Amino acid sequence: MTTAGHNSLNTSSVNTLVICGHGMVAQRLLERLVAQPRLPFGRIVVFNGEACPAYNRIQLSALLAGDASEHSLCLQPPDWYHRHNIEVHQGDPVTAIDRDTRTVVTASGRVQSYSRLVIATGSRSARLGIDGEDLEGVVGFRDLRDTRKLINISQRHRRAVVIGGGFLGLEAAEGLRSRGMAVTVLHRSNHLLNRQLDPTGGALLETALTERGLTIRTRTSPAALLGRDSVRAVQLDDETLISTDLVVIAAGITPNIALADTAGLNCDRAIAVDARLQTSDPAIFALGECCQVGAQTFGLVEPGYQQAEVLAQVLCDNASTAAFEPAVIATRLKISGIPIFSCGQTQPDGDTESVIWQDHETRHYCRLLIRDQRLTGAVLFGETSDGPWYSERIQQADDISPYRAHLAFGKPYCDAA
Ligand SMILES: Cc1cc2nc3c(=O)[nH]c(=O)nc-3n(C[C@H](O)[C@H](O)[C@H](O)COP(=O)(O)OP(=O)(O)OC[C@H]3O[C@@H](n4cnc5c(N)ncnc54)[C@H](O)[C@@H]3O)c2cc1C
């Protein structure tokens, strides 16, 4: 689908910004660009791999759980692009970048020249590298197509195995459970959400999910997915077999870097960019989940949004001093009735002290990590309303000694102290 007129061969010399990918971060970039006082581009052309305009990918979890409609995921009404004179080509991914002629080629054969190119191709579900991954009924959880497929299978089948006990896996598992499936979650580490929670938080979460009816198996990995055409069972590393009709792979993400890599741009785990989001080619920029700043890659939307702010300024003003600096980002689990908040450091090390508060009856749990009288991490389970306040203390590196004794009880007590 095209939302504005185009030529199939367009190599005109108009100052053209081409954006490759139309996910959440590319959309935020477009919104920031049209808000700039002076837009130096005669044309903005967007190519998207998916067959629909940018949508709220985060809400796919709610869509799977039946708590949101496809329509509600829409980020802008269709006429927004026309109004801002932005050409969007849906379902026509870029297949090659020619840096010598400054053109991109798309799957439909379109050739489009650019004066500036932005790569915002995001990531895809990581593959496990085991037998059976290509069987029917083995699905990732990344986009609208995956989610439709999961909903469809849940209406016809009863058993599911979700591989990965991180945010994505747990949200997929809970969504499928709420649609009536019997779901087993397999997680390699000792406790669920091991990157966001400490072992106590992980154990509380496991209890809460088990009580809802999920089967959780930690410290285990799949060795193979079995079936003739469709998946029928998961074989674990200890030879156990779990019968299933559906396998959801939610064991991490892989940045989409093939385009950039083939074009000779510097890539590591993702596309290497500097603080201005510029790649090793000064005419090409990258942001969102496909980029890497220093050693850091990104799996949350907030850093991508901050990058979009910076890149809009850089693209509109060459002399701009805007620079992206990775910040500590808080995460929340989107499973209703199980509030979890995690920010910064989650495991103590030799230099940190822990303040722990737990109410066994209400199952509220709070672990705060402190180094040199500064808060460095917060894990909250059950009661998370003070999460943003803790997150602010971590960001600002405030001296917490005046109210340290009250810290675990939250903002009102600390303010009063
Ligand atoms: C189910 C789910 C729940 C999530 N929940 C949260 C959450 O609660 N909080 C949070 O912060 N983050 C969450 N995330 C992650 C968040 O969605 C991502 O961080 C964010 O979408 C990244 O944006 P992006 O624009 O970099 O990539 P994407 O949104 O993935 O967009 C990239 C787009 O580029 C397209 N593309 C790829 N290759 C090409 C090509 N060659 N040519 C043209 N187009 C191409 C892709 O098809 C895709 O549409 C969630 C993700 C999922 C899947």
Image (cartoon, rainbow, N blue to C red):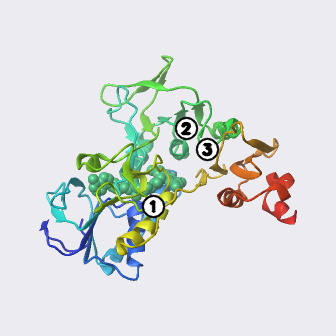
Looking at the rendered image, the disc whose residue lies closer to the viewer, 3 or 1, is 3
Reading the image, the residue beneath label 3 is 196
Classify mark 1 as within 8 Å of ligand 1 or not, answering yes or no: no
Q: Taking 313 as reference, is 133 above or below it?
A: above
Q: Taking 376 as reference, is 192 above or below it?
A: above
Percent of width and height locating residue 100: 16, 58
From this viewpoint, which residue is outermost toward the bottom? 37
Residue at the (54%, 41%) spot, across then down: 166
From this viewpoint, which residue is outermost toward the left? 9
Residue at the (59%, 40%) spot, across then down: 193
Image-quadrant location for residue 187: top right
On residue 78, which mark appears?
A: none
Q: Secondary structure at mark 3?
A: loop
- Ligand number 1: quarter of image: bottom left
Q: Secondary structure at mark 1?
A: loop
Q: Amino acid at mark 3?
A: Gln
Q: Nearer the viewer, residue 182 or 396?
A: 396
Q: Secondary structure at mark 2?
A: loop
Reading the image, the residue beneath label 1 is 56
Which class describes the residues within 10 Å of circle 3: few (<14), some (14-19), or many (20+)? many
In contact (CB < 8 Å): disc 1 and disc 2:
no
Which class describes the residues within 10 Å of circle 1: few (<14), some (14-19), or many (20+)? some
